[in-house]
């Protein structure tokens, strides 16, 4: 795939997802996977287990050159990283600021 310099999708979706994760942290909903993950009795360990699991699945999908699975696992990994950041009380804006700093 050749880099075109264009964003293939609306990057605001990540910010919107972050807002939903923060909302689920502040106002738990027993029907929400995110709420259950953030409020699990294992605490942050449960979230980190999921990050590790998704990272492993992402690596395997890349190694096996399965584009569809790679896309799905990348999305899962991004999501669980955001949940881990929230569980650790790290503001996603700080991650964006760090990426911005590195871009220069």
Image: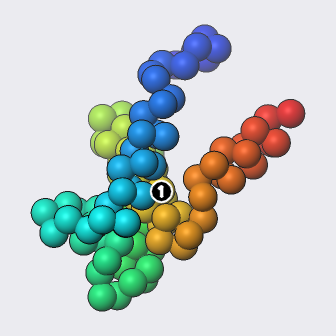
- The colour scheme is rainbow
Front residue (pair 63, 12) = 12
Seen at 75% across and 49% down, the residue is: 98
Front residue (pair 22, 55) = 22
Seen at 36% across and 57% down, the residue is: 23
**Whether residue 69 can be seen here:** yes
Q: Is residue 14 left or right of residue 103?
A: left
Where does label 1 land, which residue?
Answer: 82
Which corner quadrant holds the C terminus? top right
User: x%, y% of residue 7?
Assistant: 54, 19
User: x%, y% of residue 2?
Assistant: 58, 15
Front residue (pair 62, 11) = 11
Q: How many marks?
A: 1
Residue 27 versus residue 98 in the image, above or below: below
Extreme residue in the bottom direction: 41
Seen at 66% across and 44% down, the residue is: 96
Extreme residue in the right direction: 104
Residue 9 versus residue 90 in the image, above or below: above
Instruction: Please identify the quarter of the rendering in which residue 102 is found.
Output: top right
SS for callout 1: helix
Extreme residue in the front direction: 27
**Whether residue 56 can be seen here:** no
> Quick one: label 1, few (<14), some, or many (20+) residues within 10 Å?
many
User: x%, y% of residue 29?
Assistant: 20, 65
Seen at 36% across and 50% down, the residue is: 20
User: x%, y% of residue 70?
Assistant: 38, 42
């Amino acid at each position: 795939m050749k880099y075109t310099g264009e964003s293939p999708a609306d990057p605001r979706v990540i910010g919107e997802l972050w807002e939903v994760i923060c909302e689920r942290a502040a106002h738990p909903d027993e029907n929400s996977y995110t709420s259950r993950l953030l409020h699990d009795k294992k605490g942050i360990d449960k979230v980190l287990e999921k990050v590790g699991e998704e990272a492993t699945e992402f690596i395997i999908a890349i190694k096996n050159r399965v584009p569809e699975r790679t896309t799905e696992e990348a999305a899962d990994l991004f999501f669980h990283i955001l949940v881990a950041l929230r569980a650790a009380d790290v503001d996603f804006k700080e991650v964006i600021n760090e990426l911005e700093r590195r871009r220069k």
